[in-house]
Amino acid sequence: MHTKMTKQALFSLSLVFLSLCSTTLGQPASAPAQPADAPAQTANIPTPRGTPDVIKILQKAGGFTILIRLLRTTAVADQIKGQLDNSDTGFTLFAPTDSAFSDLKSGTLNSLNNEEKIRLMQFHTLPKFYSLENFQTVTNPVRTQAGDTNPGDYPLNVTTAGSQVNISTGLVNATVSGTIFSAKQLAVYRVDKVLLPLDIFVPKAPPAPAPAPLPVKPKAKKAAASPKSSSTTTPSTPTLVVDSGVVSLTKHGILVSVGVSVFIAAFSL
């Protein structure tokens, strides 16, 4: 019996030895230790190549058919892509959905000329990359690609309430309802309304009429200059105007008297 137990113990030890050998031989050889001053190796993580394409981003998201058409026809999509290649500040695009465009009054887009459509698309674009966190510290008014921060230059006001981002144009109050894309200096946010700028959709007051010209006063006539008196004056003889008959009687007074006397004397004879 003792011999039997010895054989079993030897058999068990043999199994343990074989198991240890197979485990050791199956392990891969350990990599040689790197020197302490050797540079660390970085993992090869694939990164997106090329400039982000706004049109492809919106097409992939879906629900932006009208916005895509406007970005193409106005060439604003090409403008964004071109400037992303040559700028480090980036861009932020507020993207209204098709349902947001359908909420507009009928004929709103058709009433705009080409220049106004370009301004409308640029009004949805900020010439700077903004993350959602950046909007919490932004200074209003915010400049858009359509102009500047001065009144009449298409500015926007962006405010936050907790994690909600609100946009005001002075005519429309919209809300950011989600992030479509945010990487490589380009952010695209979904908004629930079309951003209508005051500068296009509010009629401007007609200019005030020019004041009527004041009546021209007639020039005062100069008084006639009095004739200068001569230092030596010749006394003028007064002209006596009398009836010719009186003169004749005066001149021939004696003859008349004589004639009358003769006539009376002849009559008395």
Image (tube, rainbow, N blue to C red):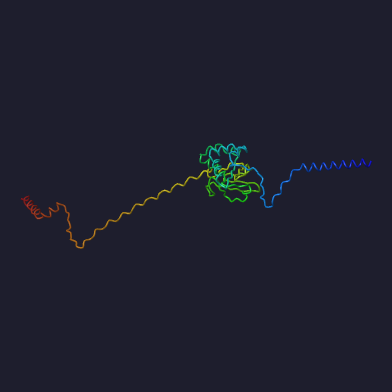
Quarter assignment of residue 187: top right
Residue 222 is drawn in which quadrant? bottom left
Residue 45, image x, y percentages: 65, 44
Q: For the image shown, how many numbered marks are present on the structure?
A: 0
In the picture, measured across the screen, residue 217 lies left or right of residue 159, that is left
Q: Residue furthest bottom?
A: 231
Relative depth, front residue between 22 and 170: 22
- Quadrant of image for the N terminus: top right
Query: Taking 198 as reference, is 213 left or right?
Result: left
Image coords of residue 95 (percent x, y): 59, 41
Vertical position of residue 225 compared to residue 59: above or below: below
Asked if residue 173 lies left or right of residue 259, the reply is: right
Q: Is residue 31 above or below residue 106?
A: below
Identify which residue, 111 or 203, lies in the foreground: 111
Q: Residue furthest left?
A: 269
Q: Position of residue 91 (x, y in %)?
A: 58, 45
Residue 196 percent location from the top left of the image: 56, 43
Q: Residue placed farthest to the right in the image?
A: 1
Nearest the viewer among 265 and 132 is 132
